Image (cartoon, rainbow, N blue to C red):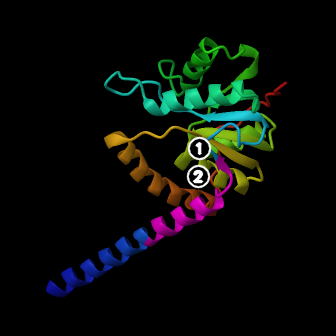
Amino acid sequence: MKKLIIKSSKILLFFGLLCLISIFISNIIIQKNATEKVFSETKNIPKNKIGLILGTSKYLRNGYINLYYKYRLDAAINLFKSGKINFIVISGDNGSKSYDEPTDFKNDLIKAGIPENKIFLDYAGFRTLDSVVRIKEIFGQNSVTIISQKFHNERAIYLAEHFNIKAIGFNAKDVSGKSGIKVQLREYLARVKVFVDIIFDVKPKFLGDKIEIK
């Protein structure tokens, strides 16, 4: 029994170390790949036809505004009004009638003065991979400015380049505090999953009809 416990402990230790190494390597690769491809100021970022907002919920469970949402919205407005993008595609989850990330963003963009005819919605952006693939396969774009927090942009850029999309990122303000730490910890696992998805050739949940942006 004692030998079995020691053997099990060694196996658990091995897999624990393997997970830590995978997290470390994935993080380094994705971070280094995004060097000079992510921007925090509009004056420095190249112009692109399309800005792609990666969706998130507008409200937290406690009813307060989700700062990740607010800061992505602010970044998109800033980028558009600075003339660095001509159109905005909002890619998010619309898994039920009561949950509609793209429409929430659209309504707030219009309130901020963005013309409705400059906004396109992708209701099947369930994951970052889906959003990135669909911007090419559904919206016909091979070049895009991704709008999210820096850590998210770095991962999205890596995925985009894997699917032969030229991508840069405009960084929305990050979120500090307890909620920010939780998201950052999840991000480490999400970066490992990027390589799992690539290895297993994971496809978007839905594709569908083409949408022309003009």
Q: Residue furthest front?
A: 43
The correct choice, above or below, for 134 with respect to 95 in the image is: below
Q: Residues within 10 Å of mark 2 (few under 14, many from 20)?
A: many
The residue closer to the viewer here, 8 or 177, is 177
Secondary element at image label 2: helix
Provide the residue designation for mark 1: 128
Q: Is residue 34 magenta?
A: yes
Residue at 75% of width from left, 20% of height from top?
118
Residue 197 image point, x, y percent: 59, 57
What residue is drawn where x is 47% and y is 67%? 24
Q: In the image, is residue 130 above or below residue 113?
A: below
Q: CA distance from mark 1 to mark 2?
A: 8 Å
Pick whichever of labels 1 and 2 is earlier in the sequence. 1
Q: Which residues are magenta?
A: 21-38
| In the image: residue 84, left or right of residue 125 | right
Q: Quadrant of residue 204?
A: top right
- Is 33 displayed left or right of 24 in the figure? right
Look at the numbered discs 1 and 2 and tell me whether their residues touch, using CB distance below 8 Å. Answer: yes
Q: Where does the image place residue 143, in percent across and percent down from the top left?
A: 79, 43
Q: Is residue 15 left or right of residue 210?
A: left
Q: Which mark is residue 155?
A: 2
Q: Amino acid at mark 2?
A: Arg
Image coordinates for residue 128, horizontal then vertical, percent: 59, 44
Compared to 111, does 84 lie above or below?
below
**Which residue is painted at 31% across and 25% down in the image?**
62
Quadrant of the rendered image containing residue 52: top right
Which residue is located at x 45 percent, y 57 percent? 188
Secondary structure, magenta segment, majority class: helix
Is 23 left or right of 83, judged from the image as shown? left
